[in-house]
Image (tube, rainbow, N blue to C red):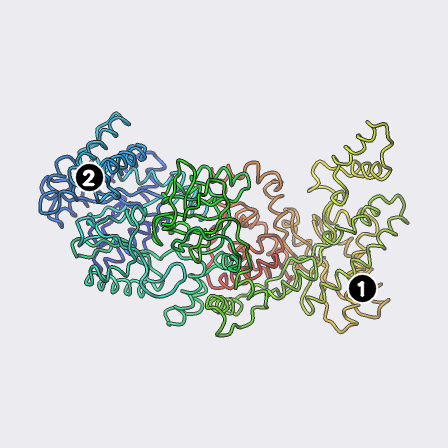
């Protein structure tokens, strides 16, 4: 019989795949001797069976019943008994943290009879009926599909009737009436009475948590975080402890370090006389956790002791949920906490300094995505934009956007290309699509541990919470702040680092981290802000351990110089076609329109000195480092005016009885002559060099003369010539013969011995599959993964991303776009074949990648383990690639992770 249920005493944190993160960490805290309410976990395997077959595993009910009996014996009470009933919680717990994305149901076991038993004893009546109304609302909304707004409206109406500002102002009689109102809502909405049998409540709650794995918000979160869809969620069943028993009770969330900055100290929120969901939901503004020291010194001291033990045990920032029940502290959850990018680097640096982590372990804890966030710009504090509100800085960064008041509007406007800021009283899990679409989230309630704060930090979104200067009126589609009315569509600026909200678009400036890299990444002084020093420490370690070189995609001397300051070890892709634009377009047009060899040669000769000076400038900027120059790749018609625009001009002249402009007519004829149905697979790359006489010779001569010029000036130019879109070794052989001829000519003319390695891009499936043959003529390979992805998948990137990629992501065909992260199963397999066969034919063959994947963190790990020598990416992605190359050298490779 397959085992589907484990007691907390039987698990450990190593069992997260089976018990989910919550169940595994609860078991770990039990092993550590911390005060955890007893319970058990239903495994992810049971969930997968249910999601696959539509019915729970055959033995699951019996196993749950057996563990429940054990729980009842230990507690000395039975679930839902009339006198002092045992109540339980049912919570989700996926293998990877998905805060707020799935369901929780509390107070299972309450009914019309057991609530009376729970109410016995001094001061328990209000608490009992408050717990019952919570159960009815949660169970009806999650299990029975009742619109929870109906319950919120009923609660709001009752508070208004009694002039109560918060829920705790309602007395026992009010709550008894509210429960009856809630049960009437359930009956009217579903035609079914609220279930009174505790066993039925438990069974249906477990299945509802299983079902919550596939809610829209859960699927959206998994897509964003690249979490596989087939893992399923575990379910933890745990004895309830109550924070809503009065002033000596409460609930809170604690962090062992500040999740926003990484600083050590006491961070978190505490809400007296409340259950845990009240803290996370932000329904009432909590007090800072430090206030607990005054309210309950004994519980505070115990909590601090448990926090220290957990951080020492996990060797990381811990996120902790706890409840105090009449002075007794209970630990309800711990996990490695979500953190901002700044906090990630700060904590890794601190733990290294404290001797808790080795430098390599610290490097493995941070990632390129966090570094990218630190490189984002920030607001210029010298600007005079009006400050209209101030809240809790929950997730740092700077964002500007138009105000919207609900998730649907955020998604709609963002889909039209508008930047938006989602403004809510507090967010709920249903707001996730809007949070993803928005540039920032602003709430009037909640703190650093609210739903908005936790989810925004996890996504790297700017967030300000608890901005009680503002009053949100979603029905009128506006908010007011300090006598300023802000209607929907108004642009505001949200500073997640300071908590300040400005009216209008505040100007942005480069971040300190960007200035550090642009200054060459020099060792910072004591006067430099700590975040810069933390980044420098991690970058030093990454550079020390990485095997992969990092080069730049750069086409101008300025880009090359910046890339070098950012740490580039050469240029992996210099695109010569970018040098044919602007003022030079007329010369390219002349080459294309040439009717004779003489006319074409004249045009090419005019381009030669311009190309030579371009190359000389780039070689100077990268002196002593390799510069891989790609010969002309795009089809020639891309350098001509738009076909439709030309046809309209010629037709308009004809309609007016005028002869068309001779050049327009000539250009239109050329465009029509060169028109291709699929130019991506047409006359481009190496094919151009073989069909257009003199083109390869001109470009190679410009490169060779630039090398000679820089050599004569005392430089150390290291140009490499790369032939694009090779399909067959014969193509490369012909081009290489021409290259060698021109290099020899220039060497003889200048007296400088010029040696430029000649290689090719591997960007077509046939090239990858015949790499052994191609390597006989190629001195290096560089994977053009953009085109290799297009041709492997049969995609035209310009068309498919807008046409159906969102549907493919929704349906789970992709976990991530193959143009964003390398498709390891398809494109990656071609890369592995080409690397193996290329080096078998030419041992020591230098191999790199110059597509956009070269700067993608997950792809860098693949290229490291595939055995490439370097990755090449845009200058601004170089620090990210350097960091990830270091991490790739340390982190064990798992084939298939991050794959399609």
Q: Determine which of the numbered discs, if any, sits on residue 766 in the image.
A: none
Q: Secondary structure at mark 2?
A: helix
Residue ID for mark 1: 705
Q: Is residue 378 left or right of residue 552?
A: left
Give 455 or 362, whichever is nearer the viewer.
455
User: Which residue shows up at 12% across the image and 36% down it?
Assistant: 113
Give 482 or 723, whichever is nearer the viewer.
482
Q: Residue 815's spot in the image, x, y percent?
A: 48, 44
Q: Secondary structure at mark 1?
A: helix
Q: Residue 539's spot in the image, x, y percent?
A: 51, 67
Q: Is residue 409 left or right of residue 738?
A: left
- Above or below residue 549? Residue 228 is above
Q: Are marks 2 and 1 in contact (CB under 8 Å)?
A: no
- Above or below residue 64? Residue 872 is below
At label 1, counting other C-alpha atoms closer than 10 Å, the crowd grade (few under 14, some 14-19, many 20 or more) is many
Q: Quarter-wise, where is residue 254 in the image? A: bottom left
Q: Earlier in the sequence, mark 2 or mark 1?
A: 2
User: Which residue shows up at 86% across the image and 66% down it?
Assistant: 749
Can residue 227 be spotted in the picture?
Answer: yes
**Position of the N terminus by quadrant:** top left
Q: Residue 542's spot in the image, x, y percent?
A: 51, 66
Point out the frontmost of discs 2 and 1. Answer: 2
User: Which residue shows up at 20% across the image and 35% down it?
Assistant: 179
Residue ID for mark 2: 132
Q: Residue 74's spot in the image, x, y percent?
A: 13, 50
At label 2, counting other C-alpha atoms closer than 10 Å, the crowd grade (few under 14, some 14-19, many 20 or more) is many
- Above or below residue 608? Residue 77 is above
Q: Is residue 125 left or right of residue 674?
A: left
Task: Give the residue at the far front of this rendering.
Answer: 483
Give 773 or 239, whichever is nearer the viewer.
239
């Amino acid at each position: 019989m397959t085992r589907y249920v484990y007691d907390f005493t039987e698990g450990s944190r190593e069992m997260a795949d089976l018990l989910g993160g919550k169940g595994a960490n609860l078991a770990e805290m039990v092993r550590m001797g911390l005060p955890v309410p007893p319970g058990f976990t239903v495994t992810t395997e049971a969930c997968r069976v249910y999601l696959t077959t539509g019915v729970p595993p055959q033995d699951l009910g019996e196993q749950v019943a057996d563990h429940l009996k054990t729980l009842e014996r230990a507690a000395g009470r039975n679930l839902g008994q009339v006198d002092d009933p045992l109540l339980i919680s049912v919570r989700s717990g996926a293998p990877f943290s998905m805060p707020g994305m799935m369901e929780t149901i509390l107070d299972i076991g309450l009914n019309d009879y057991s609530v009376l038993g729970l109410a016995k004893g001094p001061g328990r009546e209000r608490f009992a009926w408050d717990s019952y109304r919570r159960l009815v609302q949660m169970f009806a909304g999650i299990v029975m599909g009742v619109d929870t707004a109906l319950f919120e409206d009923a609660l709001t109406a009752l508070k208004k009737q009694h002039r109560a500002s918060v829920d705790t102002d309602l007395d026992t009689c009010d709550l008894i009436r509210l429960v009856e109102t809630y049960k009437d809502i359930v009956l009217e909405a579903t035609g079914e009475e609220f279930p009174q049998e505790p066993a039925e409540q438990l069974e249906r709650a477990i299945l509802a948590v299983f079902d919550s794995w596939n809610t829209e918000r859960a699927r959206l979160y998994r897509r964003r975080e690249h979490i596989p869809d087939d893992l399923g969620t575990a379910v933890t069943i745990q004895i309830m402890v109550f924070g809503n028993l009065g002033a000596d009770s409460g609930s809170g969330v604690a962090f062992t370090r500040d999740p926003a900055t990484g600083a050590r100290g006491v961070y978190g929120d505490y809400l007296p006389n409340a259950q845990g969901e009240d803290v996370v939901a932000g329904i009432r503004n909590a007090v800072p956790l430090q206030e607990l020291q005054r309210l309950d010194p004994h519980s505070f001291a115990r909590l601090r002791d448990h926090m220290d033990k957990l951080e020492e045990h996990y060797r990381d920032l811990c996120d902790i949920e706890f409840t105090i029940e009449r002075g007794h502290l209970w630990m309800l959850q711990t996990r490695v906490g979500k953190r901002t990018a700044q906090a990630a680097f700060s904590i890794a640096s601190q733990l290294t300094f404290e001797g808790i982590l080795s430098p390599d372990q610290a490097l493995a804890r941070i990632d390129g995505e966090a570094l990218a966030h630190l490189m984002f710009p920030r607001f210029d504090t010298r600007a005079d934009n009006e400050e209209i509100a101030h809240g809790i800085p929950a997730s740092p960064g700077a964002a500007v956007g138009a105000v919207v008041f609900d998730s649907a509007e955020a998604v709609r406007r963002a889909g039209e290309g508008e930047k938006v800021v989602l403004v809510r009283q507090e967010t709920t899990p249903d707001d996730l699509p809007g949070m993803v679409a928005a540039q920032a989230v602003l709430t009037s309630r909640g703190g650093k541990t609210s739903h908005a704060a936790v989810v925004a930090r996890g996504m790297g979104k700017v967030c300000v919470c608890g901005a009680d200067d503002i009053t949100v009126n979603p029905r009128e589609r506006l908010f007011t702040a300090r006598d300023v009315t802000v209607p929907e569509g108004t642009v505001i600026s949200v500073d997640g680092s300071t908590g300040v909200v400005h009216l209008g678009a505040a100007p942005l400036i480069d971040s300190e981290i960007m200035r550090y890299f642009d200054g060459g990444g020099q060792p910072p002084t004591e006067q430099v802000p700590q975040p810069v020093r933390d980044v420098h420490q991690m970058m030093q370690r990454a550079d020390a351990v990485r095997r992969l070189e990092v080069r730049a995609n750069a086409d101008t001397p300025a880009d090359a110089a910046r890339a070098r300051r950012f740490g580039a070890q050469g240029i992996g892709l210099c695109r010569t076609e970018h040098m044919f634009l602007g003022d030079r377009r007329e010369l390219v047009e002349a080459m294309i329109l040439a009717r004779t060899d003489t006319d074409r040669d004249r045009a090419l000769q005019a381009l030669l000195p311009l190309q030579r000076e371009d190359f000389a400038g780039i070689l100077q900027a990268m002196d002593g480092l390799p510069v891989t120059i790609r010969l002309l790749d795009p089809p020639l018609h891309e350098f001509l005016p738009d076909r439709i625009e030309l046809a309209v001009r010629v037709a308009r002249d004809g309609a007016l009885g005028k002869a068309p402009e001779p050049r327009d007519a000539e250009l239109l004829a050329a465009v029509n002559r060169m028109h291709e149905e699929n130019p991506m697979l047409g006359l481009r790359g190496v094919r151009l060099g073989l069909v257009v006489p003199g083109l390869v010779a001109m470009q190679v001569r410009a490169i060779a003369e630039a090398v000679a010029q820089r050599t004569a000036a005392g430089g150390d130019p290291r140009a490499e010539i790369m032939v694009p879109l090779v399909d067959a070794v014969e193509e490369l052989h012909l081009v290489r013969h021409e290259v060698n001829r021109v290099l020899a000519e220039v060497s003889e003319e200048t007296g400088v011995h010029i040696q430029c390695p000649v290689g090719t891009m591997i960007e077509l499936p046939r090239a990858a599959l015949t790499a052994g043959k191609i390597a006989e003529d190629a001195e290096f390979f560089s994977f053009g993964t953009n085109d290799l992805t297009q041709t492997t998948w049969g995609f035209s990137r310009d068309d498919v991303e807008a046409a159906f990629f969102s549907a493919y992501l929704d349906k789970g065909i992709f976990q991530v776009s193959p143009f964003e992260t390398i498709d390891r199963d398809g494109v990656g397999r071609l890369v592995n074949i080409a690397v193996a066969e290329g080096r078998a034919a030419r041992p020591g063959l230098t191999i790199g990648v110059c597509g956009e994947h070269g700067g993608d963190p997950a792809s860098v790990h693949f290229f490291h383990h595939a055995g490439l020598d370097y990755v090449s990416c845009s200058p601004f992605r170089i620090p990210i690639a350097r960091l990830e190359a270091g991490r790739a050298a340390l982190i064990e490779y798992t084939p298939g992770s991050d794959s399609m």
